[in-house]
Image (spheres, helix red, strand yellow):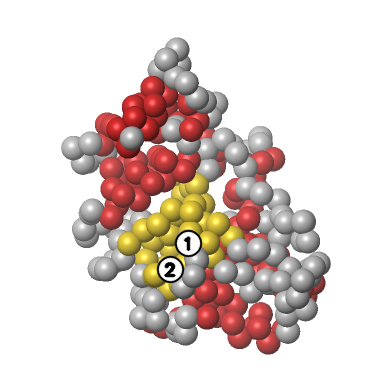
Amino acid sequence: MIEKVADLLDRCRSKSDTVMPRTELFNEGWLLRVVLDWYSHQRNLDSPFAFEQGAKWYSEGRLSSPFLARHKGDQCAEKHTNADGIIGHFSFCPDTRSGIKPDSNATQLVVVEAKLGSGLSEGIKNAPYYNQVARNACCLAHIASKAGITQDSLTKLAFYVVAPESRVNNPKSKADKKLREWTTKSSIKKKVKNRAEDYGKEEEWYEDKFLPFLEVMCVKLITWEDILSDMESSAAGTEYRAFYDKCKCANLVK
């Protein structure tokens, strides 16, 4: 049956032969997975995606929020955040299918949000201003804090947004402008502080639990082209570039 599934996905390569939308295969999710898999096998790379010793990766893991429901029908609460990709030292929370729990001795925790044609989400129902970048950065700081990790013990704590170069450097698009404006610590600080106040979190939590981790967190906007430049020196470099080109074509990205 696995071979049949692989055959059906393979038919996405042909516009005339495919039996499903080509974006079922050629999308940011699969693009990120093959990229993370490649980096996991490399050593001594000077790259934001470099894996430290003992680190692993996972796609679509769930990050706990500091603003979970305190009671049934809590109007100020939110659910967990799904992370497109996670790199680092972690395990899974007991009794969950994909809840992420950092190891107590973790030195690397990296969360990646992957984009092709779609934009970053504006906010959530209970907080329309609490955008996708602020939410991910906040949840990353929260799970690190809950695990008892200190800022000094982390050699790499990061949140990256990956998007096509044509979108990162597009001054005319309002959606693409948000990619640049939201991936700044000043924007994240403002949004998380407002969210904490609306939820009823004490100022002590923001000052003592969140800000120290944000200070050591690397928040960065990266292009897929930068990532592919690392991969092009490998034997399969042209295959990764070809897959990226198909993803752009299927998602109408120029």
Q: Which residue does the numbered mark 2 point to in the structure image?
A: 92
Residue found at the far top of this picture? 16
Left or right of 8: which side holds 113? right
Picture residue at 47% right of the left edge, 85% below the top: 148
Circles 2 and 1 in contact, beta carbons < 8 Å: yes
Picture residue at 68% right of the left edge, 72% below the top: 67
Picture residue at 66% right of the left edge, 41% below the top: 175
Q: Nearer the viewer, residue 71 or 44?
A: 71
Callout 2 amino acid:
Phe
Residue neighbourhood size for the residue with mark 2, other residues' Cα within 10 Å, grouped as few (<14), some (14–19), many (≥20): some
Picture residue at 42% right of the left edge, 15% below the top: 17
Residue found at the far left of this picture? 235
- Expressed as whole percent of the image width and height from the top left, the position of residue 151 reads 45, 81
**Residue 112 visible here:** no
Looking at the picture, does residue 192 appear above or below residue 164?
A: below
- Expressed as whole percent of the image width and height from the top left, the position of residue 50 reads 31, 58
Callout 1 amino acid:
Arg
Left or right of 31: which side holds 170? right
Looking at the picture, does residue 152 appear above or below residue 179?
A: below
Image quarter hosting the N terminus: top left
Cα–Cα span, label 2 and label 1: 8 Å
* Dot placed on the residue nearer the N-terminal end, 2 or 1: 2
Residue neighbourhood size for the residue with mark 1, other residues' Cα within 10 Å, grouped as few (<14), some (14–19), many (≥20): few
| Closer to viewer: mark 2 or mark 1 | 1
